[in-house]
Amino acid sequence: MAKLAVFFSLTFAIIFLASTGLRFLALRVDWARPLPQRPQTILTAIIAAAHWALPLSLYGSILLGLSYAVRGRYSALITVGCLFILSMVFSFGISSLLENWTLVPPALSAGKPLGESGLILSNALNKNETAIVLLQGPAEPLGPRVAAVPDRPLIFQEGAAIDAAFDLPPVPFGDDTPWFLKSLVIDLRLSGEQFQRRFSAGVFSFLLYSGALICFLCSLGFILKFSVWPLANLFLGALAFRGILALETFFNSPEMQEIFESFLGNRLSPVLTVPLIFLGFGLLVHLYSILVYVAKRRDYDDD
């Protein structure tokens, strides 16, 4: 149990710190894209990045912890109990810390201008694409520029006030990220926002939701025993955890919340619906694992 606790703690800390740092850099780049640039708060970006990294750390550390316990042939009861307690402690502690950080007055910081003189801005998503050339670069986004409108001659503007109809598109960045990675980023952001809302609603709401989700995740240890190849089992477990993350986003969507509310009426609070679903699934899977273990044990005793 001590080895499993140390492994889980180190895994959670590494994933959380690494993912928070990467998400913080991504947010800073997103803030630097709009022109003219406005001062932003570093603390706000760090808090937003940490909220995004919390569900990723929770899912990833539980998955790796289950894989480590299976390869070490640890007791299933000890494994589930240890992972459940540590996951609840880490998730509650980080959420409480981030909630307190929001009370700290943040300091404004200006982003570094991207590009030089002659920077070309265009919005490729717009069918009537308008390209704007900033003659003095992003340092003077409202200064002299040239606008290229489709089917019209080039327009020179001494300043933005001459023709306010031409809004500056964001600074372009190449984005060849596959859709499954983009959807993963979106689902993690929605999951982090759900944890944040639950914590703001009260300790009971947060513990109920996080506990039910962790119970559901810990019940999937049997997937990591499908074959004799640990890497293949880990891949199957990652697919299963990705499905639970998508299921979490689906159940918490406004459309599903309306369906739950219309179906259950006043018999059950909407706050309890999703946690009870996760808890029910988790208990069923745990019961299935226990029955399989008892059946195998009986067959072994009969032989």
Image: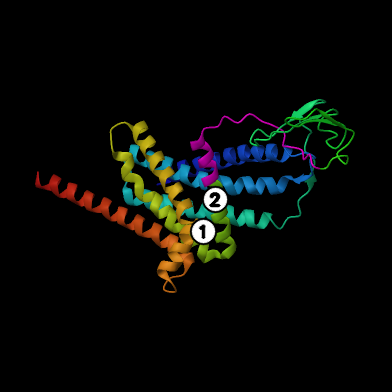
- Which mark, by number, is residue 254? 1
Q: Is residue 209 above or below residue 76?
A: below
Q: Is residue 79 left or right of residue 50?
A: left
Residue 50 spot, x, y in % from top left: 61, 47
How many numbered tags mark residues here?
A: 2
In reply to whether residue 169 is colored magenta, the answer given is: yes
Residue 70 spot, x, y in % from top left: 34, 40
* Circle 2 residue: 190
Going from N to C along the chain, the mark reached first, 2 or 1, is: 2
Residue 22: image quadrant is top right
**Viewer-proximal residue among 8 and 226:** 226
Callout 1 amino acid: Pro
Q: From the image, which quarter does the C terminus lie in?
A: top left
Q: Residue furthest left?
A: 303
Q: Is residue 83 above or below residue 266?
A: above
Q: Which span of residues is magenta-colored? A: 165-187
Q: Tell us which disc is closer to us: 2 or 1.
A: 1
Callout 2–callout 1 Cβ contact below 8 Å = no
